[in-house]
Image: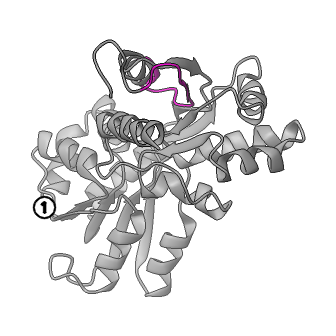
């Protein structure tokens, strides 16, 4: 039985691949008794030049789209900050308040609501595809838009943009940030070796590109098959914060990842604790 003296993760090692909120995540696992290994894979970075982002601000104000798909709260916030730096923040918000805006998830919706922008629809799956499905299905709120602006999140989901274009919809893209490597001193390669050696019990991912980064690191040291094998067999359990994040794991045949019901850090930590308790009781 788990007690205050023997927390759920006592004696277990959890590897954290996140850069943003890594200390918060690691601290949460440590409070449940885990030893935490930090191996940041990727970090969010503003685009090198804001010219393209500013161009979308001006275009949105001058010729408002029929619908806007907001995929991340961070991306929306940064888009607005670029506008504010040019004295266009109020105009951008006024424009967005007059068009249909959909959010990929609760965090994006929260940022919209904080700025007084009505969210016509909030996705439940965490996938951009859900918003695109909504648009293509002729959602009454969107009224079959002729023009859609999509705020992309670090890595562009080109397949979803093409679905919109194939339906005759003009697509504008705003990319306020991108992913860049956060791997300093080849910590990911070290993590790969530790997973293969059986020294890691759980490895957590909060973004799909971080999974790809770990796979790339495994290939670079000639241990991709060994890494995937360890994760498939459960010698180390992969943990993904949501359905988008788990997708590259599943594509690699890793179908036993721990995924919380709610796509939140606290829910992810709880899911790992529950998994560890269940494993200990077998």
Depth order, front residue of 177/245: 245
Q: Is residue 81 magenta?
A: no
At 52% from the left edge and 51% from the top edge, which residue is drawn?
257
In this rendering, would 177 be left or right of 93? right
Nearest the viewer among 56 and 245 is 245
Viewer-proximal residue among 156 and 233: 233
> Residue 11 in magenta?
yes
Find the magenta span and give its range: 9-23
Residue 249, image quadrant: bottom right
Which residue in the structure is indicated by mark 1? 98
Colouring convention used in this rendered image of the protein: one colour
Principal SS element in the magenta part?
Answer: loop
Would you identify the image quadrant in which residue 150 lies? bottom left
Taking the view exactly as shown, the residue that stands out farthest to the top is: 5
Question: Can you tell which quarter of the image residue 147 is in?
Answer: bottom left
Q: Residue furthest right?
A: 222
In this picture, residue 118 sits left or right of residue 57: left
| 80 lies above or below 7 | below
Q: Is residue 144 left or right of residue 229?
A: left
Kindly identify the residue that appears in the image at 37 percent across and 17 percent down: 6
Mark yes or no: residue 241 visible. Answer: yes
Q: Position of residue 184 (x, y in %)?
A: 70, 19
Name the secondary structure under disc 1.
loop
Residue 242, image x, y percentages: 41, 51
Which quadrant does the N terminus fall into?
A: top left
Task: Name above or below for residue 252 compared with residue 228.
Answer: below
- Residue 118: x and y in percent read 11, 56
**Residue at 29% across, 20% down:** 3
- Point 52% across, 19% down: residue: 11
Could one spot residue 47 in this view of the protein?
no
């Amino acid at each position: 039985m788990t007690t205050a003296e023997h927390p759920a993760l006592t004696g277990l090692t959890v590897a954290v691949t996140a850069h943003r909120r890594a200390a918060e995540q690691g601290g949460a696992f440590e409070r449940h008794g885990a030893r935490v290994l930090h191996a940041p894979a990727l970090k969010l970075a503003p685009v090198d030049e804001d010219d393209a982002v500013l161009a979308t601000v001006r275009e949105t104000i001058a010729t408002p789209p029929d619908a806007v798909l907001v995929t991340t709260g961070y991306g929306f916030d940064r888009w607005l900050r670029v506008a504010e730096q040019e004295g266009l923040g109020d105009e951008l918000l006024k424009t967005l308040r007059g068009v249909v805006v959909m959010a990929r998830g609760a965090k994006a919706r929260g940022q919209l609501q904080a700025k007084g922008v009505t969210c016509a629809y909030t996705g439940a799956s965490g996938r951009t595809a859900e918003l695109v499905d909504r648009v293509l299905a002729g959602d009454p709120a969107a009224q079959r838009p002729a023009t859609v602006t999509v705020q992309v999140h670090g890595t562009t989901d080109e397949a979803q943009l093409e679905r919109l274009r194939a339906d005759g919809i003009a697509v504008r893209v705003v990319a306020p940030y991108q992913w860049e490597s956060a791997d300093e001193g080849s910590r990911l390669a070290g993590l790969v070796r530790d997973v293969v050696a059986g020294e890691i019990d759980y490895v957590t991912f909060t973004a799909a590109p971080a999974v790809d980064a770990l796979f790339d690191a495994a290939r670079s040291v000639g241990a991709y098959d060994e890494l995937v094998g360890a994760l498939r067999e459960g010698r180390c359990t992969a943990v993904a914060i949501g359905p988008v994040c788990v997708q590259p794991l599943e594509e690699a045949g890793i179908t036993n990842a721990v995924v919380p019901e709610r796509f939140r850090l606290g829910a992810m930590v709880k899911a790992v604790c529950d998994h560890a308790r269940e494993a200990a009781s077998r």
